[in-house]
C-alpha cells in the first residue's frame, strides 16, 4: 500500500466512491484489512466502513471480531460512521442479523454521547422493522437498554416501538415488566410514553387486559397531569372492551395535520356557531417517505448536513388559495398533487399543473414560465374542457401579467361530477393570453395593445389516486375489524404482470394508498404475497385494501407470466369502495 498517511487516505476515498461496483473493490479487501490497525484513526475508520460495505456474507463474523478491538480507541464521531456502515450491512445480509444485533447491543452498553447512542438505536429499530426474524432479539436488546437510559427522547421512542411491535410477538407479556418499570422510575415524559405503550398491550391482547387495567389504575394517582390524564383516559376506554374504540383511539392515531387542526380549532372558537366541530374537515397528515441515500461516499470527520424541514404541502397551498376570494368558500384542501409538466422543457412557455382537491371541487393551478425575453403575456388563463367526463368548469382566475423570463400562476375551478363513483377523466387544456412585444434590454412593453393567442397544452388526467390521501395504520388488522364488512367489495383479477414486486408497486401507485405492516416488501423466493393498504378518501372516509397475489395466472397471451389477485376493499363510504376498485379495472 501507499506509504504516507495522506496518500493512503486519498486512495481510500477513491475506493469508497467505487463502492457502487463492489465486485471491483473486493480485490482490495485484503489490503484494506491491514489498515484496520493503522495508527491514523481516519484511515482505520475509512477502511472499516469500506469493508463493511464491500465485504461478503461469509466474512461478516471475522470482520466484527476485528472491529471490536478497534472501537474502544476512536471517538464517538467515528463510531457513528461505523454504525451507519453496519446498518447498510444489515440490509445487505439480513441472515446475519444475530451477529450484527449482538455487536450493536454491546456497543449500546459502552459509554457514549447522545448522537452515538441515537445512531445505534436507529439501526436496531430499522433492523426490527425490516427483518421479522430479528424482531424479538432487537426488542430484547432495546428493553435492556432503557433500564439504564439517560436520554429521554431515546427512551420514549423505544417505548413507542415496544407498544407497536410488542403485542404482536409470541410472548408479549415479557415486555410489560420493562415498560412498567419506566412508570415507576423515570421522569414524566418517559412515564407518559410508558402508559401509552401499556395501553396498546391491553387493547391488542384480551389475555393481558386485566393486568394492564390494574397497572393503569395505579398510575391514575401519578403526580404529573399528563401521566394521570393518559392513564385515566386509557383505563376508561379499555374497561369497555370495545375493539372499534381501541382501534380508533389507542392502536391507531388520528392521522390529521396538527398545524391545520390548531388553525381550524382557533377559527372555530373565534366564530359564533352552534354546529359541532367536524374532525373530518381537518386535512390529513401527509405520510413522508424516506428517500434512499444516493451518496455512497464516506466523509470521515466531516460535519453532516442538516435535515430539510418537512412542510405540509396542503397547509402551504391552503393559505395561498384562501387569499383568493373565489376559493374562500371551498374549505380546507383535501389533497394537493405534485406538479405535472404539460409542456416540453424546451418550449417558449413551460407549464406545470398542480391539482388541489376539495370535497366537491378541484382547483387546477397552472404555473407558467415565460422563457422569452422579448414578449410579455397579459390576461393569461387556461381553458379546460371536461364536459364529456362530467366535469364542469365554474370559474377562471387569470394571471394579469407574466413578464419576460418570469413565472406566473393562473387557476381554473372545476366542479366534480354529480355521480359520486365517476371521479376520473381527462380534461383538455388550452392556454389563452394576450401577447405584447417588449424591449429585451429593459423589459418594457411597446405601446401596442398586443394580440390574442393560444397555446395547446397536454391533457390533465384526474386519477383515483388524486382523491385518496395516504395514512399509516400502525395496526392495520385492528382497523380492518373496526370498519367491518358493511361496505365491502371483493373481486378476483388476472393481471399481466411478471413479478410480485412489480404488481405491488403498480397497485400502490394506481390507488394512491399507503402500504402497512411493511407489506410493500416481498420476501425473496415467494410465489404469493398479501398487500395491506390504508388511505382516506375525499370527504374523510377511511379506506382499507387487502390484495392477495399469487404467481401463475392465465392470460390471453400464451406463455406470458401473470398474477392472480384477490382484491378486498372496505370503507366507511359505499361510493369510495367503487372508486378504489375502478383503479385496477
Image: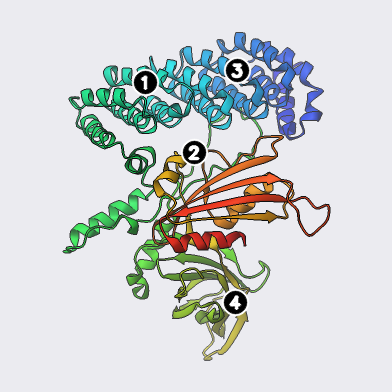
Q: CA distance from mark 3 to mark 4?
A: 68 Å
Q: Does label 3 or label 1 sit earlier along the sequence?
A: 3
Q: CA distance from mark 2 to mark 4?
A: 41 Å
The answer to whether any part of residue 301 appears in the image is: no
Crowding at dot 2, Cα within 10 Å, few <14 / some 14-19 / many 20+, comes out as few
From what the image shows, is residue 458 above or below residue 166? below
Q: CA distance from mark 1 to mark 2?
A: 37 Å
Q: CA distance from mark 4 to mark 1?
A: 74 Å
From what the image shows, is residue 230 above or below residue 435? above
- Residue 346 spot, x, y in % from top left: 68, 68
Q: Provide the residue designation for mark 1.
A: 176
Q: Provide the residue designation for mark 4.
A: 440
Q: Secondary structure at mark 2?
A: loop
Q: Nearer the viewer, mark 4 or mark 1?
A: 1
Crowding at dot 3, Cα within 10 Å, few <14 / some 14-19 / many 20+, comes out as some
Q: Residue 538 occupies which quadrant of the picture? A: bottom left
Q: Does label 3 or label 4 sit earlier along the sequence?
A: 3
Crowding at dot 4, Cα within 10 Å, few <14 / some 14-19 / many 20+, comes out as few
Q: Secondary structure at mark 3?
A: helix
Amino acid at each position: 500500500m501507499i506509504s504516507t498517511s495522506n496518500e493512503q487516505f486519498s486512495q481510500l476515498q477513491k475506493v469508497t466512491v467505487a463502492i457502487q461496483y463492489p465486485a471491483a473493490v473486493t480485490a482490495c479487501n485484503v489490503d484494506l484489512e491491514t489498515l484496520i490497525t493503522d495508527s491514523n484513526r481516519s484511515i482505520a475508520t475509512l477502511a472499516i466502513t469500506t469493508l463493511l460495505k464491500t465485504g461478503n456474507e461469509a466474512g461478516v463474523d471475522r470482520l466484527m471480531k476485528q472491529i471490536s478491538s478497534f472501537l474502544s480507541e476512536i471517538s464517538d464521531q467515528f463510531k457513528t460512521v461505523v454504525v451507519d456502515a453496519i446498518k447498510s450491512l444489515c440490509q445487505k445480509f439480513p441472515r446475519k442479523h444475530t451477529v450484527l444485533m449482538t455487536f450493536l447491543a454491546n456497543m449500546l452498553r459502552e459509554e457514549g454521547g447522545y448522537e452515538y447512542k441515537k445512531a445505534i438505536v436507529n439501526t436496531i429499530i430499522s433492523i426490527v422493522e425490516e427483518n421479522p426474524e430479528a424482531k424479538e432479539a432487537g426488542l430484547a436488546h432495546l428493553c435492556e437498554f432503557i433500564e439504564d437510559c439517560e436520554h429521554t427522547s431515546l427512551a420514549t421512542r423505544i417505548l413507542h416501538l415496544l407498544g407497536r411491535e410488542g403485542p404482536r410477538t409470541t410472548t408479549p407479556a415479557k415486555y410489560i415488566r420493562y415498560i412498567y418499570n419506566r412508570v415507576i422510575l423515570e421522569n414524566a415524559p418517559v412515564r407518559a410514553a410508558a402508559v401509552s405503550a401499556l395501553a396498546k398491550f391491553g387493547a391488542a391482547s384480551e389475555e393481558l387486559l386485566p393486568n394492564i387495567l390494574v397497572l393503569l389504575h395505579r398510575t391514575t394517582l401519578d403526580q404529573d397531569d399528563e401521566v394521570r390524564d393518559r392513564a385515566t383516559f386509557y383505563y376508561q376506554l379499555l374497561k369497555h372492551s370495545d375493539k372499534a374504540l381501541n382501534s380508533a383511539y389507542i392502536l391507531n392515531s388520528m392521522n390529521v395535520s396538527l398545524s391545520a387542526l390548531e388553525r381550524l380549532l382557533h377559527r372555530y372558537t373565534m366564530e359564533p356557531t352552534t354546529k359541532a366541530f367536524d374532525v373530518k374537515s381537518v386535512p390529513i397528515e401527509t405520510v413522508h417517505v424516506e428517500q434512499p441515500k444516493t451518496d455512497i461516499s464516506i466523509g470521515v470527520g466531516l460535519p453532516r448536513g442538516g435535515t430539510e424541514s418537512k412542510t405540509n404541502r396542503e397547509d402551504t397551498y391552503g393559505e395561498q388559495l384562501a387569499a383568493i376570494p373565489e376559493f374562500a368558500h371551498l374549505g380546507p384542501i383535501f389533497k394537493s398533487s405534485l406538479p405535472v409538466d404539460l409542456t416540453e422543457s424546451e418550449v417558449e412557455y413551460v407549464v406545470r399543473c398542480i391539482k388541489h382537491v376539495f370535497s366537491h371541487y378541484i382547483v387546477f393551478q397552472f404555473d407558467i414560465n415565460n422563457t422569452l425575453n422579448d414578449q410579455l403575456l397579459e390576461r393569461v388563463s387556461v381553458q379546460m374542457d371536461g364536459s364529456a367526463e362530467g366535469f364542469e368548469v365554474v370559474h377562471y382566475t387569470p394571471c394579469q401579467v407574466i413578464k419576460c423570463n418570469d413565472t406566473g400562476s393562473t387557476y381554473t375551478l372545476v366542479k366534480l361530477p354529480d355521480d359520486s363513483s365517476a371521479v376520473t377523466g381527462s380534461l383538455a387544456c388550452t392556454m389563452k393570453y394576450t401577447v405584447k412585444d417588449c424591449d429585451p434590454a429593459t423589459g418594457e412593453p411597446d405601446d401596442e395593445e398586443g394580440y390574442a393567442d393560444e397555446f395547446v397544452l397536454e391533457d390533465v388526467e384526474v386519477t383515483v389516486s388524486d382523491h385518496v390521501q395516504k395514512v399509516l395504520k400502525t395496526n392495520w388488522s385492528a382497523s380492518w375489524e373496526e370498519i367491518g364488512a358493511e361496505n365491502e367489495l371483493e373481486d378476483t383479477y388476472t393481471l399481466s404482470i411478471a413479478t410480485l414486486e412489480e404488481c405491488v408497486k403498480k397497485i400502490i401507485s394506481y390507488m394512491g394508498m399507503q402500504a402497512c405492516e411493511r407489506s410493500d416488501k416481498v420476501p425473496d423466493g415467494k410465489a404469493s404475497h398479501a398487500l395491506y393498504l390504508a388511505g382516506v378518501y375525499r370527504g374523510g372516509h377511511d379506506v382499507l385494501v387487502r390484495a392477495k397475489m399469487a404467481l401463475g395466472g392465465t392470460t390471453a397471451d400464451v406463455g406470458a407470466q401473470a398474477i392472480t389477485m384477490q382484491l378486498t376493499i372496505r370503507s366507511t363510504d359505499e361510493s369510495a369502495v367503487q372508486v378504489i376498485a375502478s383503479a385496477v379495472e
